[in-house]
Image (spheres, rainbow, N blue to C red):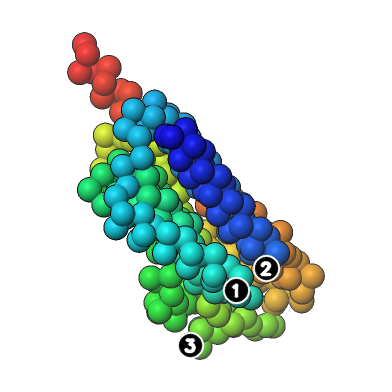
Amino acid sequence: MFKRQFFGLMAIGAGLVTLNMTLLWKLGDTAHFYMSVVFWLAVGSLLWDKQKTIKENGIKGDRLSIIAGAILIALVLFKSAIVSSKFDPFLRSAPFVSGLGLALIAAGFQNLKQYGRELLILFFHGIPSVITAPLGSVVTTFTAQSAHVILWYLGFNAVRNGNHVALPTGRVLVDGGCSGMEAMNYLLGLAVVCLVMFPTKQNKALVISVAVACGFIINAFRVAGMALLVAAKRLDLFKYWHEGEGSLVVGMIAVILFGIFYQFMLKQDSKISKKSAS
């Protein structure tokens, strides 16, 4: 009975993951698609590591939790059938809602903590971008200010007027898509994945802060660079870095820088452990 139930949950979970990834790909949200691969692999790795525990505990959902989980999964399926835009908040919240529904069926309300780490990763996968959406205009202003300061320190005759960053031969408008909010949310989620998968003894708040700062600062440099490209009349390169593969490259740079920082933190852990042992 347990094997049949467990196989059924795994099949439903695999179907929900496939559905979400397919929607992201078809709607053109390429950046979130590739980030989703990282988060789903992290969740899959955690579940694989605890498969023995899952088999020992069995399916512990009661009638109420099974009904609640089924309702959440049904909502995901219903919304998936009508979503039509990559900007729909549902696409970001669906992984967590799906995971919560499956966890309620598998463990019930009382044992939900059994899947706490997996749910934590899925929460930070997309929910922060939904929560922080109203702050977009504020962050956009900070991004414009930061790009202006960067250009000014580099010796360029830059002027800022609202969210416009202008040079003598051209100017750019920093809108919500260039605010850096997306990059900050991605790096925040990646920091949570690192803390869950490879825990560090160092300050957790510092790790989170550095991740968010990396996303914001690298994006501010990207905006400053695009202002220079517009001023130089290189609209082909501007388009590449604004909406082409260049925007993904900038994201990868931020991820690499954070990875270097976290590797340094883990090495510090190793040094502390060696000192304690000696």
Figure check: 161 above or below 185 = below
For mark 3, give the secondary structure: loop
Residue 271 on image: x %, y %: 30, 23
Q: Residue at x 66, y 58 (%)?
A: 22
Residue 172 on image: x %, y %: 62, 80
Figure check: 44 above or below 206 = above
Q: Is residue 140 visible?
A: yes
Kindly indicate the quadrant of the structure image that contains residue 246: bottom right
Point out which mark residue 83 bears. 1
Q: State the residue position of label 2.
A: 27
Figure check: 31 above or below 252 = below
Q: CA distance from mark 2 to mark 3?
A: 32 Å
Residue 112 on image: x %, y %: 29, 47
Q: CA distance from mark 2 to mark 1?
A: 9 Å
Marks 2 and 3, the one that precedes in the sequence = 2
Q: Residue at x 38, y 70 (%)?
A: 131
For mark 1, give the secondary structure: loop
Kindly indicate the quadrant of the structure image that contains residue 221: bottom right
Query: In the picture provided, is 234 more to the left or to the right than 166?
Result: right
